[in-house]
Amino acid sequence: MAVSGIPFGEGPVMASRVHNVRGAALIMVLWLVAALSLVVLAGAQGVRQQTQRTALDMERLRVESVLDAAIQLTAQRLLLGRGKDSQYRVQRLSLGQSDVWVEITPSGGLVDVNVASEALLQALFQRAGGLSSGEAAILASRVKDYIDPDDTPGGVGGAEAAQYRAAGWPSMPRNSALEDLSDLKSVLGMTAGLYEIIAPHLGINGQQRIEIDSAPPALIDALTGQQGLGARLHKSPPEMRAGVLLSGAAAEFFTPARSSGGQTVRVRAFTQAEGDRWWQREVWIDPSERPDALTPWTTRSVEPTRRFNKPEQEFKP
């Protein structure tokens, strides 16, 4: 018997089928809504990240103009003092609403890997870079081998072309003095992380020892193993600095001699933007003028403006 064209007994089955179809449709709708929500959230997140990147880029441009102005002003002052003894110092400049701290480091206060002794290089790698004594000794030997003109490994664990090929290293020894400090990253065993740590302590000055009055506090701390000693020494009379550094374990690394104001200088400018964001700009300046230069001094190199963590030591005027 049929009711309204539906065979007897099939009514409940049909109702169940309709219910199932409606349930499946509801689930599909819910899945679709969830998927659309994820798409919207992902799009909003992407827009937010893009907005943040744009804001950060704009901040970098504003900060860079301030840092460049501070560096230009510092270069002009260096020219005025040309011929005077060079020494490490930090000065504070107020430019508009921005405070800029400028660190001036004569090249004589840094480590020149071209002429530094293996003992100095080993101390730098071990005490500043965190290598073990054995690792530091091996790397110091390899730096010397990378630079020297011969093809015979020297020192402990030295390496020349044969060792580079055996290790599958992507570069070969330079066999000449470094002109660009970043070439140090090509030395067998040198890592990008270690180079980033020691790079602030490096310069090219042709001197085997570090000028005490030109050395940054961080380098003095690293080589002597006495945290805070560098800052204390720079606040003390010059004769006291020599007395302390030339009588300790690191005495062979330092010299009391002071170069004239004609040597190249590393100028690093720092400023704080909104919040705790600090920015840095680094420039190497040669006080001598080059015929094709647009300024009375020569700019040797310029590092991109970059963010960095709050300085370990608070800059003071």
Image: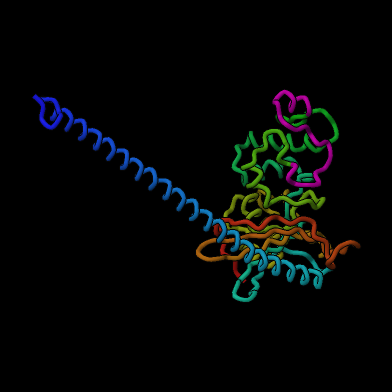
Which residue is rendered at x = 67% and y = 37% of the image? 190
- Colour scheme of the rendered structure: rainbow
Residue 260 visible in the current orientation? no
Q: Which residue appears at 62% of the width and 44% of the height? A: 129
User: Residue 56: horizontal and vertical position, in percent?
Assistant: 57, 59
Q: Position of residue 296 (x, y in %)?
A: 85, 68
Camera-nearest residue between 311 and 41: 41
Q: State the image coordinates of residue 287 (x, y, percent, origin top left).
A: 83, 64
In this view, 70 is above or below 182: below
Q: Is residue 274 above or below residue 251?
A: below
Q: Residue furthest bottom?
A: 96
**Whether residue 26 is situated above or below residue 205 in the rendered picture:** above
Q: Is residue 31 magenta?
A: no
Stretch in magenta: 161-183
Residue 168 lies in the magenta stretch:
yes
* Residue name at image x 61 percent, y 61 percent: 60
121 or 267, nearer to the observer: 267
Question: In screen coordinates, is 167 left or right of 271?
Answer: right
Q: Is residue 43 visible in the rendered structure shown here?
A: yes
Looking at the rendered image, the quarter that the C terminus falls into is bottom right
Displayed quadrant of residue 158: top right
Single out the residue that lies furthest toward the right.
Answer: 291
Q: Residue at x 81, y 65 (%)?
A: 261
